[in-house]
Image (spheres, rainbow, N blue to C red):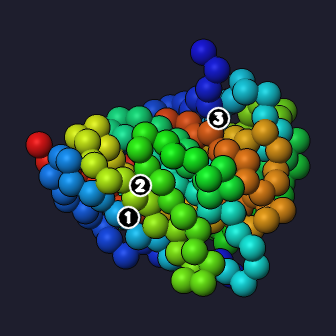
């Protein structure tokens, strides 16, 4: 089944903990992304990697660190979790990194920080 | 910096009625515009893009550069159109998608 997959689907944790979200795509795409969707459903890009290299790094706290071991994987590690980190995190991928290419999204990881 | 605005948070229409989702953008160059849709319990997926000039599931959207708009329209809404719709923009030769705030469409029987 070709798709963008994320694990875990749900993540409930305490403030101050460190957690990781994994993303994998088997579409053969070169570019992967992380988006954050807040409680008001607003979607905002966080990071983008092309062939394991960081190409977009929005204004995100440095507690968030993406890691791309290969072009099929883009993981998101979050240190010292805060209440405001509670959101749905979406991974996405696209064939290349230019213009009007379709981005394919994962199912999302719902993070709740208590 | 580019910006996308969807003024309606919620649109509620009856089945068979026309539906129009507004999207306005601000960007000084030539953008690529998209509509993405998220059905209940499904992932976000591309609905259509202005460069393709196509109609998908009965939806159309026309880029109006004078009004900097990319409104999404369907003449006869169906119950299965109930979903969250996002307008998005990317700069030509860029890949950063900037999303609007989303519009939830509810089609009532």
Q: Chain of mark 3?
A: A
Report the Cα–Cα distance between label 3 and label 1.
32 Å
Q: Quadrant of residue B92?
A: bottom right
The residue sitting at the left extreme is B109
Marks 3 and 1 in Cβ contact (< 8 Å): no
Find residue B21 and name its label. 1
Q: Is residue A60 above or below residue A79?
A: below
Q: Position of residue B2 (x, y in %)?
A: 65, 77
Report the Cα–Cα distance between label 3 and label 2.
24 Å
In this rendering, does residue A16 appear at all? no
Quarter of the picture containing the C terminus of chain B is top left
Marks 2 and 1 in Cβ contact (< 8 Å): yes
The residue sitting at the front extreme is B75
Label 2: how many Cα within 10 Å (few below 14, some 14–19, many 20+): many
Q: Is residue B102 above or below residue A23?
A: below
Quarter of the picture containing the N terminus of chain B is bottom right
SS label for mark 2: strand
Q: Which is closer to the viewer, label 2 or label 1? A: 1
Q: Earlier in the sequence, mark 2 or mark 1?
A: 1
Which residue is denoted by mark 3 in the rendering? Answer: A23
Q: Is residue B106 left or right of residue A103?
A: left
Q: Is residue A31 left or right of residue B33?
A: right
SS label for mark 1: strand
Which residue is denoted by mark 2 in the rendering? Answer: B85
């Amino acid at each position: 089944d070709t798709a963008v997959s994320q694990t875990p689907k749900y993540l409930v944790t305490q403030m101050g903990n460190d957690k990781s979200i994994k993303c994998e795509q088997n579409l053969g795409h070169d570019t992967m992304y992380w988006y954050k969707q807040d409680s008001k459903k607003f979607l905002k890009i966080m990071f983008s990697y092309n062939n394991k290299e960081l190409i977009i790094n929005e204004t995100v706290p440095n507690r968030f660190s993406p890691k791309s071991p290969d072009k099929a994987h883009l993981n998101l590690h979050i240190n010292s979790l805060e209440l405001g980190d509670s959101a749905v995190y979406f991974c996405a991928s696209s064939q290349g990194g230019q213009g009007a290419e379709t981005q394919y999204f994962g199912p999302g990881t719902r993070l709740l920080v208590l | 910096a580019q910006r996308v605005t969807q003024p309606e948070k919620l649109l509620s229409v009856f089945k068979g009625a026309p539906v129009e989702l507004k999207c306005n953008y601000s960007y000084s160059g030539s953008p690529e515009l998209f509509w993405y849709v998220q059905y209940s319990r499904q992932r976000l997926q591309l609905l259509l893009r202005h460069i393709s000039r196509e109609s998908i599931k009965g939806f159309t959207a026309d880029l109006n550069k004078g009004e900097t708009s990319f409104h999404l329209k369907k003449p006869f809404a169906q119950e299965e159109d109930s979903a969250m719709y996002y307008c998005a923009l990317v700069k030509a030769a860029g890949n950063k998608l900037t999303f609007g705030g989303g519009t939830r469409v509810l089609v009532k029987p």
